[in-house]
């Protein structure tokens, strides 16, 4: 044996990845080779580099997923529960993430609705952030933005049809009819929602309106039925206090 056990225990081993000095924590004897081999501690430098790389890759995925700066710092863990209704909606979103494989395979979605500023988009942004960590492709948008970006050739409808998890924010706020004719927004909305429903693509919605009330916003019966089909869970958030205004009240000025 070229090196004995005590000699190896007192050695400093270089990390093969980054060259950082590593402490030998134990020595393992391989009888077949008649040799001792050092077992080192984990390289903290490599763990730090790996963490930084994961965070960088997540930021890139969130940027590609159209997650705005407003929501980048939000996590389920720091999303304050305003009341029981908000807590139930947040818990459902967290459970959705835990069941992401099932949701993706079966095209299961969610429909969050309630008054303005109740934290619907914040919950869905946290949900998409967690799904991005799990390796899925994600995208957050609204139908007006979709039509605008497609018109400007900044976005392909085919991408939205196939992204793993899509959140359509603030549905029902768009102008779907112009006189008696459908708008360009309505045309693209129908095409997108129909394609995702047909191909079991998980689609989540936020709205100020219940699904049945979308008819008042100009949605056809057929597209409302498809939205309903995609919305496996329908959850209303009822809070007296605005989620946005609550954050504003906490400012020091």
Image (spheres, grey):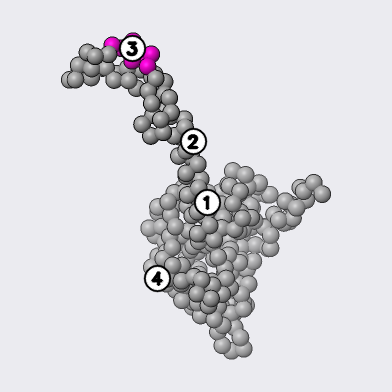
Q: How far apart in space, not on screen, are marks 1 and 2 (Cα)?
A: 17 Å
Residue under numbered circle 1: 59
Q: How far apart in space, not on screen, are marks 4 and 2 (Cα)?
A: 44 Å
* Quarter location, residue 242: bottom right
Dominant SS of magenta comes to helix
Viewer-side residue, 183 vs 15: 15
Q: Residues within 10 Å of mark 4 (few under 14, many from 20)?
A: few
In the picture as drawn, the residue positioned furthest to the left comes out as 32
Disc ID at residue 198: 4
The residue mark sitting in front, 1 or 3, is 3
C-beta proximity under 8 Å, tags 1 and 2:
no
Disc ID at residue 7: 3
Residue under numbered circle 2: 48
- Res 235 visible: no
Q: Which residues are magenta?
A: 4-11
Mark 2 or mark 3, which is nearer the start of the sequence?
Answer: 3
């Amino acid at each position: 044996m070229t090196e004995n056990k005590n000699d190896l225990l007192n050695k400093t081993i270089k990390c093969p990845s980054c060259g950082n000095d590593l402490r030998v924590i134990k020595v393992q004897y391989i009888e077949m080779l008649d040799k001792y081999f050092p077992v080192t501690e984990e390289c903290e430098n490599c763990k730090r580099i790996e963490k930084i790389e994961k965070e960088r890759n997540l930021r890139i995925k969130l940027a590609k997923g159209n997650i705005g700066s407003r929501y980048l710092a939000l996590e389920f863990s720091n999303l304050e529960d305003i009341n029981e209704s908000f807590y139930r909606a947040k818990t459902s979103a967290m459970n959705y993430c835990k069941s992401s494989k099932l949701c993706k395979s079966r095209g299961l979605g969610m429909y969050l609705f309630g008054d303005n500023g109740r934290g619907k988009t914040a919950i869905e942004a946290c949900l998409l952030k967690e799904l991005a960590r799990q390796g899925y492709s994600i995208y957050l948008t609204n139908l007006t933005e979709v039509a605008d970006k497609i018109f400007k050739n900044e976005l392909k409808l085919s991408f939205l049809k196939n992204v793993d998890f899509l959140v359509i924010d603030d549905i029902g706020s768009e102008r779907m009819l112009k006189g008696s004719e459908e708008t360009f927004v309505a045309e693209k909305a129908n095409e997108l929602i129909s394609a995702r429903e047909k191909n079991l693509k998980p689609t989540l919605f936020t709205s100020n309106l219940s699904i049945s009330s979308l008819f008042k916003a100009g949605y056809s019966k057929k597209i409302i039925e498809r939205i309903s089909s995609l919305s496996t869970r329908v959850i209303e958030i009822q809070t007296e206090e605005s989620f946005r205004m609550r954050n504003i009240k906490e400012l020091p000025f």
